Amino acid sequence: MGDFLKWVRKGFGRKLTLLHAWNGWIVVVLALSGIMLVMNYWRGVLGEGRVWLKELHIIVGLLSLVPVVFYLLLAAKHWKQLRGKGWQKFNVFVVLGLLVGWLISGVLLWQFRAVGPWWSNHALTVHDLLTWIGLPYIIYHSITRTKWLKEPNRRTVRTEREQKTVDVPIHPAASPQSYLSRRSFVKWAVGGGIAIAVGPSFLKWTVNTLGVSLGSPSYEEIVTRDGNQLAPLPQPMPASAPPIGGGAKGDFRIYSVTPIPSFSNETWSFTIDGLVDKPMTWNWEQFVKLTRKVQVSDFHCVTGWSVYKNTWEGIPLKQFLQEAGVKTNAKTVKFYSGDGVYTDALTLEQAQMDDIMVAMLHDGNLIPSELGGPVRLIVPKMYAYKSVKWLNRIELIDKDHIGYWEERGYDIDAWV
């Protein structure tokens, strides 16, 4: 162990510089891959590649532990160089805190099935918060610490050759007076630019995710700007308004593999067909008259977030199957989204679960288009990629069907 430590600490300045660069590239890869994983545009463009990108993000995230460990082996000597430099010590603590926080929350998200929805939901919030704070900080740090802005005698990581030259005192008259002005101007400009670019989005995320009482709640905004134009609106049952679940706890994140569709009375219909005795189709006016039930259930996304105590109102899937009459050779229930792209499926046995619902209302409101309305499937015991949004057709088929995300690497059985 002693020989290993000697090897690690030999050529201290060069190794610390390489470690700094290595860590920087790891953060760049994690930032780019993380942004691509959460953006709706890239969800559609990447397709199956998104699963591989997620694996890359996980692997690189785990590798981020390596520079942290190596730095800790060099920290004692580096700390001596930082004597009297409070802001640089602060920077070390911040960067280490970000890396460790990202790593721990990332591992919890990676192992979401093992740790359960509560831990993964909070881990996602922490992961996001560190990203909102960390990326602007790292960008600011990277730009303002470039060599052309940083005075040589202020660098803490120096080679032996630099140490021999930069420690010679410089006469004040020989120092250009505009140097600090340029440096200060650039630092303020970079900081201001980052604040303007990131600030509004961070404030919105804080309001929506952490529940800070600024502006309207995100759910109310989504309901208000619903793109669907349907009449009449379904009248909520007494158990929906007010919701017997007490109101949903948490916020939905809006994901879509296509542009979000919207519907009117002329463009919306609902069909159940395939291997059934009585194929049926409803228009909107007919559909809102169907007998509905109310249930309370949690909603879990495979990406790590959850919304608890949702009050859903709709028609149990079992009711549709019973009324249509399932033929004996039917094996699978296939669900179609009104976006024209997304499909998924359940086995006939899975489709008999009592809490699977073709939902129309959430907490007493017609489900808005951004959340998959006016009608969406709800499968509480499975992750949300099974809960098909903009549901407009159910087909009974005699073979297996691989859904949109299952074709791209997700589990076919999405049990929570």
Image (cartoon, helix red, strand yellow):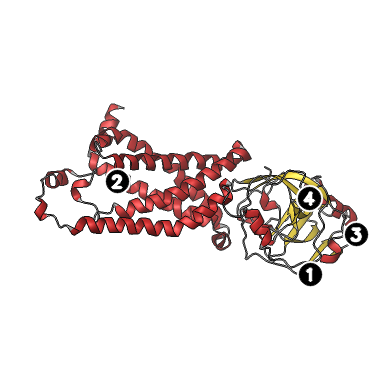
Q: Earlier in the sequence, mark 2 or mark 3?
A: 2
Pointer 3 and pointer 4: residues touching (CB < 8 Å)?
no
Numbered badge on residue 265: 1
Report whether residue 283 is seen. Answer: no
Label 1 or label 3, whichever lies nearer to me, is 1
Image-quadrant location for residue 388 = bottom right
Could you tell me the amino acid type at mark 4?
A: Ala
Image-quadrant location for residue 45 = bottom right
Residue furthest to the top:
2
Q: Earlier in the sequence, mark 3 or mark 4?
A: 4
Residue 171 location in percent, x, y? 9, 50
Please state if 281 lies on the left or on the right of 374 as rendered: right
| Above or below: residue 262 compared with residue 404 | below
Q: Earlier in the sequence, mark 1 or mark 3?
A: 1
Q: Secondary structure at mark 2?
A: helix
Residue in the image at 76% along x and 57% along y: 334
Report whether residue 152 is seen. Answer: yes
According to the picture, the residue beneath numbered tag 4 turns out to be 241
Could you tell me the amino acid type at mark 2?
A: Leu
Q: CA distance from mark 2 to mark 4?
A: 61 Å
According to the picture, the residue beneath numbered tag 3 turns out to be 277
The residue nearer to you, when weighing 282 against 194, is 194
Could you tell me the amino acid type at mark 3?
A: Asp
According to the picture, the residue beneath numbered tag 2 turns out to be 18
Residue 113 location in percent, x, y? 61, 40
